[in-house]
Image: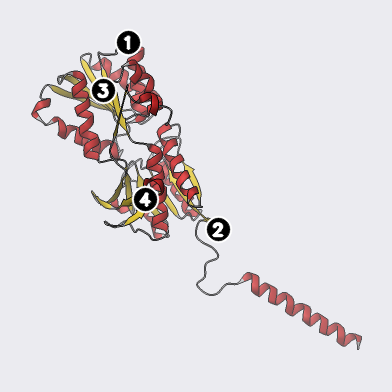
């Protein structure tokens, strides 16, 4: 009797273990073990900026993180030490292996990133660019700070006013491959074709690679090569701050004028001193924030990146996908002018 009872109990125990294993270790066919890029129910959204040590980029990533966390997800912030496509490709590969839900990238090169970004999209990851665009085949939509034509033209108009409509000017850009910089510079050149600028000569476009030391060196080289230089346009936050320091150190206030795109917190001393009478920018926090909401809208299917798609971007309100060269884009707004009348207020903001 005892032997029969022992055998019975053994059978019951085996069946119980098998049932437990079946319940915990299998799922119906076609069901995923969890959302791609999810951690504890949260999806992972990544942003890759051009390089570290860039205050503008830090603000942009901060805005992205704010949006993603508002939406209840997890933000991954990445940037290489140097602004190269190769470094960004390595980071894209890492994010693919992490199965993130979306990648937002500020491209160091419009074309070199295409194989890696297409690989990400082929694996179901939503890809968008912001600030500096990658080509249309490499992303679903681009987040644009402002109308590129207006950005380019307004900077020529500004430097013309500053130098009295005559004299030599130069441009201190970021990298030679930066799509946003190159587009703005093309519009600067188009604006210069107007006969009213016939006495203004664009002598050189220099590249500081968005590195402070190199931007300082390039500014010094411009001043040495062109002793009659009257104005510098630096459509990059790193470049304009570097140029402001060089002009200040050399006592060139009023002799070489400076405008471009800068962070109010970094440019306040140069605007207050008159080294730069005024400059422009948008809020990089808002650029990143809009990108976060656009990434979420792509992931949840609210938009696909097609012209006419609409979504609500948190505190920025309703936004619409519009046409872009080679793809589509979402526009943040107009460039904003910072001068001595408002810089004290804005330098405390960003």
User: In the rendered image, is residue 155 in sight?
Assistant: yes
Location of the C terminus by quadrant is: top left
Q: Is 288 situated left or right of 194 in this image?
A: right
In the rendering, at what x and y percent does residue 188 appear? 20, 32
Name the residue rendered at 20%, 33% in the picture. Answer: 153
User: In the rendered image, is residue 212 in sight?
Assistant: no
Name the residue rendered at 38%, 50% in the picture. Answer: 313
Q: Which residue is mark 2?
A: 41
Instruction: State the SS at label 3.
Output: strand
In the rendering, at what x and y percent does residue 242 appear? 36, 22
Q: Which residue is mark 3?
A: 232
Using the image, determine if residue 219 lies above or below residue 20. Answer: above
- At label 2, counting other C-alpha atoms closer than 10 Å, the crowd grade (few under 14, some 14-19, many 20 or more) is few
Q: Earlier in the sequence, mark 3 or mark 1?
A: 3
Name the residue rendered at 10%, 26% in the picture. Answer: 196
Q: Is 209 situated left or right of 62 in this image?
A: left
Q: CA distance from mark 4 to mark 2?
A: 23 Å
Q: Which residue is mark 1?
A: 251
Using the image, determine if residue 268 lies above or below residue 327. Answer: above
Q: Nearer the viewer, residue 319 or 9?
A: 319
Q: CA distance from mark 2 to mark 3?
A: 50 Å
Using the image, determine if residue 5 lies above or below residue 258. Answer: below
Q: Which residue is mark 4?
A: 128
In the rendering, at what x and y percent does residue 73 appear? 50, 52
Q: CA distance from mark 2 to mark 1?
A: 58 Å
Q: Nearer the viewer, mark 4 or mark 2?
A: 2
Q: Is 190 situated left or right of 95 in this image?
A: left
Q: Nearer the viewer, mark 2 or mark 3?
A: 2
In the rendering, at what x and y percent does residue 221 appear? 29, 19
């Amino acid at each position: 009797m005892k032997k029969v009872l022992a055998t019975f109990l053994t059978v019951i125990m085996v069946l119980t273990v098998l049932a437990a294993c079946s319940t915990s270790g299998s799922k119906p066919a076609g069901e995923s073990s969890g959302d791609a890029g999810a951690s504890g129910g949260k999806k992972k959204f990544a942003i890759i900026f051009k390089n570290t040590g860039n205050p503008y980029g830090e603000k942009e990533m901060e805005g992205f993180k704010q949006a993603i966390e508002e939406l209840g997800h997890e933000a991954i912030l990445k940037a290489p030490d140097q602004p190269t496509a190769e470094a960004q490709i390595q980071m894209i590969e890492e994010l693919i292996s992490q199965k993130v839900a979306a990648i937002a990238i500020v491209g160091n090169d419009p074309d070199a990133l295409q194989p890696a970004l297409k690989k990400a999209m082929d694996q179901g990851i939503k890809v968008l660019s912001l600030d500096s665009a990658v080509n249309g085949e490499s992303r679903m939509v681009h987040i644009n700070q402002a109308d590129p034509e207006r950005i380019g033209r307004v900077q020529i108009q500004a430097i013309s006013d500053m130098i009295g409509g005559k004299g030599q000017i130069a441009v201190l850009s970021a990298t030679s491959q930066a799509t946003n910089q190159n587009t703005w510079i093309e519009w600067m050149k188009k604006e210069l074709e107007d006969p009213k600028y016939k006495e203004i000569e664009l002598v050189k476009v220099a590249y500081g690679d968005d590195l402070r030391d190199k931007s300082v060196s390039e500014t010094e080289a411009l001043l040495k090569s062109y002793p009659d230089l009257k104005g510098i346009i630096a459509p990059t936050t790193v470049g304009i701050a570097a140029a402001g320091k060089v002009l200040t150190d050399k006592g060139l206030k009023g002799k070489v004028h400076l405008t471009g795109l800068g962070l109010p917190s970094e440019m306040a001393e140069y605007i207050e001193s008159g080294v730069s009478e005024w400059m422009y920018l948008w809020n990089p926090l808002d650029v990143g924030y809009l990108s976060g909401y656009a990434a979420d809208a792509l992931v949840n299917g609210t938009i696909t990146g097609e012209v006419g798609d609409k979504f609500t971007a948190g505190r920025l309100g309703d936004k619409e996908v519009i046409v872009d060269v080679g793809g589509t884009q979402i526009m943040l707004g107009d460039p904003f002018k910072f001068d001595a009348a408002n810089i004290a207020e804005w330098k405390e903001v960003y």
